[in-house]
Structure formats: structure tokens, C-alpha cells
Amino acid sequence: MGHVIREGDDVLLFLDRRRTYLVRVERRAFHTHKGVVQLGELVGREYGTRIRSSAGVEFVALKPNVRDHLFKMARGTQIIYPKDLGLIMIYTGVGPGSRVVEAGTGTGALTSVLAYYVKPSGRVYSYEVRPEFVEIASKNLERAGVLEYVELKNKDITEGIDESGVDAVILDLATPWLVVPHAYSALKGSGSFASFSPTIDQVVKTVKALREHGFVYIETVECLLRGIRAEEGRTRPETLMTGHTGYITFARKGLRT
């Protein structure tokens, strides 16, 4: 039944690679520049089904994945791109059952990805100083179907971390170096630390703090993503690419002797 669209489900209406629409399936009309789509006609049909608008234009009703929710969620802050999120997940080893501390929440983009991967038995503890972002994030996480795996905290993580024995601490903050000593205390032995920073000055301060507080396996990376236009006889790199978004610093907790 998970492959059948029900009333109240979200679907991603796909027109082309640049035009997609995340909509809630209800018995109503959805207006696009390519005509009106009657969403009620999708109820009871399989994900992947094709539906035509009033203008005769074909859309495909896809089942939204974590990437789709990420790009369509309401924003108040810049999100971390999937190219960087993928590295964070692999380098930190976050997975089902992991307990993860995250800050700052922003509108919940990184939070939603972490929650998706720690379920069903894990937990994300997300710190955010701005109450309006906590409210926005809560709504975004609920729509993405992962709110039950997250504890949102309207707190300043630079003043301390409530949790202990966690598997990872992941930061998207202006001053991550201030959190390093708290992260060391909160992490279990060999636990993972990750920090996303737009500027190299932030990285230098964070790496210095990591070395001073007993972290090992410290490394900083940058991921550049270039799309390829694949057409017979015309294949070439895309003119535009997602270049610098930020630097990611990783480390592991080594126990003190």
C-alpha cells in the first residue's frame, strides 16, 4: 500500500528537471502555468503515475524523498546542499539508532536529513537560538514525516550541551569553535564531530580548538559539484555549477589518558 497515493499524502509533480511541485493530495485543483491538475484524480493510483493537466500537459506524480522535501521546505536561512550533506552522513557514520546533537537548526534542512537516517530508534537533539526558526523547522519536519525523531531546543549551544554519550555532534554555526569543548564532553569515545563553515577563517579557529581539546583524525574538505548535459552529440559540462558552498571539518573524539 506504500506505493498507492492516498488522500493527504504529499506527491512531487514532475514536469521537467527544473520544474517540480510538492503538493498535498486533496480533492482540489492545482493551478500551474501548464494548466490545471485535478489532484483528486491521483487518489488510489500508484506513485509514478502520469496525469494530464487541463492544457493536455503531462505531469508525473512521484513519491517525495528526503531530497525533494529538502529543496521544497519553507526557508528562512541558507540550507546545506545535498553534495555536502552526503559527505557529512558518510564521514560521521550517522545511521539507524544514532543519537545526534545538531546546531543551529535554521529551518530544519540538515535536521530533516539526520532524522531520516537515525530513524526508527535514533534521536536528533537540535539547538536553535531563534524561536521563529524553531517554529518554522517544526512545521517543515512534520511535513517531511520525521518530527517524532527530533527534539527541538530553543537554546544557545555555545553555553553547553545537555546530552551525553552521543554518537555525533554536527554544527552549522558562525562560531563552531566555541562549541568544541562542549562537543568533546557530550560525545562518546570515538564519536564524530562535523562543522560546516562558509569561510576558511572559521575553519582555522575550529581546527585549532579541536587540536587543543583532544580530537583526532581532523580533516577539512570542500566538495564541488558539476552537472553534465547528456544529449547524443551534445554532451558537455553544464555552463553553471554548484561551486563553493562551504568547508566541512571532521574529527573524532580520542579519550584522554
Image: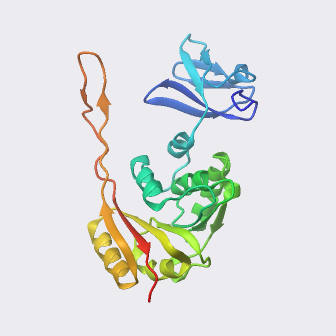
Number of marks present in the image shown: 0
* The quarter of the displayed image where residue 64 is located: top right
Q: Residue 11: x, y in percent?
A: 63, 32
* The quarter of the displayed image where residue 238 is located: top left
User: Looking at the image, is 48 positioned above or below residue 86?
Assistant: above
The answer to whether residue 164 is visible is yes
Q: Nearer the viewer, residue 121 or 115?
A: 121
Q: Residue 43: x, y in percent?
A: 74, 24
User: Looking at the image, is 14 positioned above or below residue 95?
Assistant: above
- Image quadrant in which the C terminus is located: bottom left
User: Looking at the image, is 144 positioned above or below residue 42?
Assistant: below
User: Looking at the image, is 203 positioned above or below residue 68?
Assistant: below
- Image quadrant in which the N terminus is located: top right
Q: Nearer the viewer, residue 139 or 103?
A: 103
Q: Residue furthest front?
A: 257
Q: Residue 205: x, y in percent?
A: 31, 77
Q: Residue furthest top?
A: 56
Residue drawn at 37 percent across, 78 percent down? 210
Q: Residue 223: x, y in percent?
A: 32, 51
Q: Residue furthest bottom?
A: 257
